Image: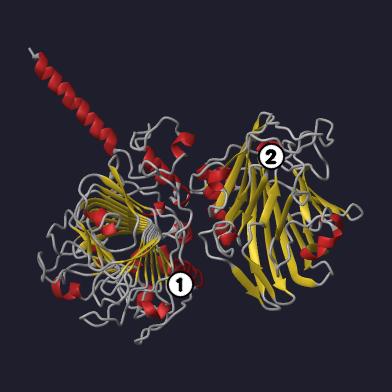
Amino acid sequence: MMSLQSSTIKLVLVFLLISAGVSAQVPAFPGAEGAGKYTIGGRGGKVLYVTSLEDSNEPGTLRWAVAQKGTRTILFQVSGQIRLKSPLRINNGDLTIAGQSAPGDGICISDYETIVSADNVIIRFLRFRLGDETERAVDALSGYRNENIIIDHCSMSWAIDELSSFYDNKNFTMQWCFITESLKNSVHGKGKHGYGGIWGGHNASFHHNLFAHNDSRNPRFCGSRYSNQSDQERVDFRNNVIYNWGSNNIYAAEGGSYNVINNYYKYGPASNNRSKKRLINPDADNGENKQPAGTYGRFFLTGNYLDGSPEITADNSLGIEMGSTFTKFAPDVTLKDIIAREEFSFLPVTTDKAEEAYEKVLEYGGCALVRDVHDLRYVDNVKNRSYSFEGSAGSTHGLIDSHTDVGGWPEYKTYNSYTDSDNDGIPDGWLEKNYPGKKSNELHSSGYTYLEIYLNSLVNHLMGGNSKVFPFCTQSENEKAEVEFKEDRTGEKIDVFINNLFFTSFIYPETLKKPCLYPILTPSGKFITRGYPLDPRPYERVDHPHHVGLWFNFGNVNGLDFWNNSSAIAPERKKEYGSIRLDSIIELNSQKGKLTTLSSWVDYQEEKLLSEKTTYIFSGVGNEYRFIERTSQLTAEQEVTFRSDKEGFFGLRVDRAFETPEDKPVKRLDVSTKLAEEPFIYNEGVNGVYRNREGLTGEAEVWGKRTPWVALRAQKEGEIITLVILDHEQNPNYPGWPHARGYGLFSMNNLGGDGMDKSADPIEIRLESGESISFRHKLVIGGDLSDEEINNLMYRFNKQ
């Protein structure tokens, strides 16, 4: 008979085993896949902030945070370049480094190598761009003989040995990374190098990565040379993109089992003719390390696309070129011996066709939350089969010899800083808004802590390239909205209908001093724009008569104020203001939902400062969502200077429901739309709340804080409506400053500068006659949109 004590112990053990099993099945983050999928990292541990870009052992530095012991998550309160003064070795595991937390352009680690020498490590959204100033023949990022590691959305460049080598690790994943532009004729003791990486492991996955502009080792499979455990060497290599290799792409693999599945090979200007015709160049071991000579690997190849070689694409076995080492060390081994007929089993990875993986890696890969000029260049090079630079020591066709050949490190700016008063890793107000009453390190039912949920929310739109995550963003699974224009020249307007429902009008009476879109309605027929002064509605504020509908102008152009001009300006002050006059409508295309106009920016004497060409794209999905995209090119007709000012650029004056409840009387209309005799408070139906991508909420927190998007949510007549302004990443001074006021002004200003944030640099953009500058923004009108949905919209807008 079992004793009570024995029974209790067994029950406890069963519970612990079950609990451990449940915990083990939570992925490192949504979108983590492959052999390292279930890495835990710093989940549930302490939060350490990097507040300084210095490299020292002082608190607040990356080196200090990495050296700490215990379960921990490293976050960043600064963006910029961390110039290492010695190798950075991660010796203490149970660690997550969340690069996506950096406010602004992100983090770049340079000068010395970073080495993972611990178990249970998650590294995300960092750049490792080594450079040759310290003359060290090392990798930018590497790690060997560890367990449970996942590297996600990182960018590695300009190393002298390999860019990034990971082998002899157990349960390892590298995914969605860029491995680009190694240095060929640099300071390596062996002479020419220029290599991508040595990859392998005992259960290792490498998927959705980009190799570009590396002479060789794209990658070199390590094999079991150093472990002498060929039965344990198991590598899954799928959905990767390899571009512009020089002498070789994939080779070696002396021992082990390899899946090479659905990868995309695109030769480039540096690719030699022989290497253009192969997928892999395997070798037999020469016996110089820890295993017998003649040891070789076996390969399952399928679905690989070799650009320029349809026959090898159709039959991947034709793309295997056995190395000369087989003749010397394994003369009896044939091609038939090294080809596996069945796929080797691994934890699953979402597998795309090679052509689809090519598109997704270029769109979502690398340190993609804010791509720097180099990652943008790599993507452009791959798409156009081009290169931008050559080496300073003889390398050509996109292969380089020094980081200086490509201009070196750009500036990585800090902006969108947030306050975390309790140092729990989450901006103040985010938990209260999304998960009231919860704590950062509490576990959600998903198995993630609330800190992880917050960190994951910043980048969910980049994970896996899945266009079906937020299906309303695409029209593949929804009814496409039909656009119709109805022009009324007498009324000086063009009405816009979507699915036979009135949406807005493009109006251009001279009294407005600018063309604008007014009014704007939801698909259910609710106004999102204020009526005053054109068509006043009860209880509206009586202020800012120049705030009409949706418009575009600025408050300081050659000292003239184009923003505040209206018919209410006194005659003696008109010389201080500018106007925008519509010149012509040059395109109305209902099929594309496209309206293109030409206008002139003029002073009070009608002297022309700027020509404006604007294209509107009106669209929607079914009768749920509406979109207005505006692209404006401004061309100087004389020397023109824009200077910092809070009044600009893409502005909307919203309906009362979207205002913030007030605590002081204001001038407003009464129920009959007549001006009330006395100012008064009227908050009925007023419930607007601003928020931005960084999780800040409310006018006081959002106004003037740079962000790529700002949202305004309200409930009107029982319907939840969210308005979002998206700033395009190619706009000047991206991301802009939101001019978001509780009284109903909702604007994104790319030239705010010190006019909105006293700590910001002043802005001055000077155009000579004939020079142009362009701006692109998008207004989204939807229901109760989540941050993840808006992030997805933002990312797609930037990639259009």
Give the x, y percent position of residue 780.
64, 47
Q: Identify the residue position indicated by label 1 in the image.
A: 308
Measured in 3D between alpha carbons, the distance from the residue under mark 2 to the one under mark 1, in whole angstroms, is 45 Å
- Toward the viewer: 162 or 521? 521
| Quarter of the image with the N terminus in it | top left
**Which is more N-terminal, label 1 or label 2?**
1
Specify whether 777 is left or right of 540. left
CA neighbours of label 1 inside 10 A, class few (<14), some (14 to 19), many (20+): few
Q: Residue at x 19, y 72 (%)?
A: 326
Give the x, y percent position of residue 162.
27, 70
- SS category of the residue bearing label 2: loop
Q: Is any part of residue 155 visible from this angle?
A: yes
CA neighbours of label 2 inside 10 A, class few (<14), some (14 to 19), many (20+): some
Specify whether 597 is left or right of 31. right
Report the amino acid beneath label 1.
Answer: Gly
Q: Identify the residue position indicated by label 2 in the image.
A: 623
Q: Residue at x 28, y 45 (%)?
A: 42
Specify whether 736 is left or right of 185. right
Residue 321 tag number: none
Total numbered labels placed on residues in the image: 2
